[in-house]
């Protein structure tokens, strides 16, 4: 099927309240343009430099999501335009995003990345660390960021029960964190689920899925 057909199919299978982020990392602008022409406006990249290049080449009504691990020293390159940063896993990074957002007179939306997988290679905060962060005085002083929810990546496994358990942990964490009150904390989004497991993620409470290979085909390794 074409990129357009793949998009139409996926959108027909997900509920209205679930946001589809088209994961376009490693894909050429020509492929993104096909998705854009099919009506897609939210694209996810995992490398800031690649996202900046695509931002400059593509129409300006696109919402760009940074879905990869973020290095603090590269935040400045995406600060003028990024719509949502998924992988915020420490206060130092949040502080840098706030600093760069302020320079551009913006408030940048972010998700706290929660470690739900058993794999050591996965980034993320523990639920207790996220709770402590949201209650801290230092967090309350950040005026140019807004935490709009949480993000998590399940273990790369065929074991559906384990994946379900991890997704459920993220939903439970979101529900617990929701009780915290702060002007820069507006919890609405649970970003979990990718090409292979988004249906299960939605069942477990996901409101945002990140889908790449089911739209564009297998990605180029880099």
Image: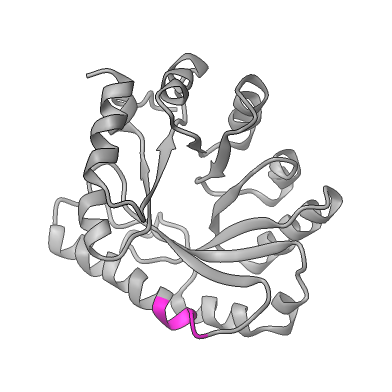
Horizontal side, residue 33 vs residue 98: left or right: left
Say which residue appears at 61% left-offset and 78% top-offset: 133
Say which residue appears at 42% left-offset and 24% top-offset: 35
Q: Where is residue 71 in the image (x, y as percent from the top left)?
A: 64, 48
For the N terminus, which image quadrant? top left
Say which residue appears at 65% left-offset and 80% top-offset: 182
Q: In which quarter of the image is residue 17?
A: bottom left
Q: Where is residue 52 in the image (x, y as percent from the top left)?
A: 66, 30
Q: In this view, does 126 lie above or below 4?
A: below
Q: Is residue 66 above or below residue 179?
A: above
Q: Principal SS element in the magenta part?
A: helix
Q: Position of residue 41 (x, y in %)?
A: 50, 34
The question of residue 65 being in magenta is answered with no
Q: Where is residue 64 in the image (x, y as percent from the top left)?
A: 57, 39
For the C terminus, which image quadrant? top left
Say which residue appears at 19% left-offset and 64% top-offset: 162
Q: In this view, does 177 lie above or below 116?
A: below
Q: In which quarter of the image is residue 218?
A: top left
Q: Quadrant of residue 173?
A: bottom left
Q: What stretch is highlighted in magenta?
A: 175-179
The furthest residue to the top: 30
């Amino acid at each position: 099927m074409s990129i357009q057909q793949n998009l139409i199919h996926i959108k027909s299978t997900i509920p209205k309240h679930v946001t589809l982020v088209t994961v376009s990392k490693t894909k050429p602008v020509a492929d993104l343009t096909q998705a854009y022409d099919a009506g897609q406006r939210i694209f996810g990249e995992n490398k800031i430099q690649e996202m900046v290049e695509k931002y400059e080449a593509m129409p300006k009504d696109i919402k760009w999501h940074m879905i990869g691990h973020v290095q603090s020293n590269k935040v400045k390159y995406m600060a003028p335009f990024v719509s949502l940063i998924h992988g915020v896993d420490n206060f130092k990074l949040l502080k840098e995003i706030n600093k760069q957002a302020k320079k551009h007179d913006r408030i940048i939306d972010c998700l706290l990345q929660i470690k739900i997988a058993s794999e050591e290679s996965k980034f993320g905060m523990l639920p207790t660390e996220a709770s402590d962060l949201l209650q801290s005085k230092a967090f309350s002083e950040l005026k140019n960021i807004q935490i709009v929810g949480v993000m998590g990546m399940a273990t790369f496994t065929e074991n559906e029960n384990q994946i379900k358990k991890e997704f459920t942990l993220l939903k439970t964490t979101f529900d617990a964190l929701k009780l915290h009150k702060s002007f820069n904390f507006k919890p609405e989004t649970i970003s979990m689920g990718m090409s292979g497991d988004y249906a299960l993620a939605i069942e477990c409470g996901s409101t945002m899925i990140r889908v790449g290979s089911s739209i564009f085909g297998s990605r180029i390794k880099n």
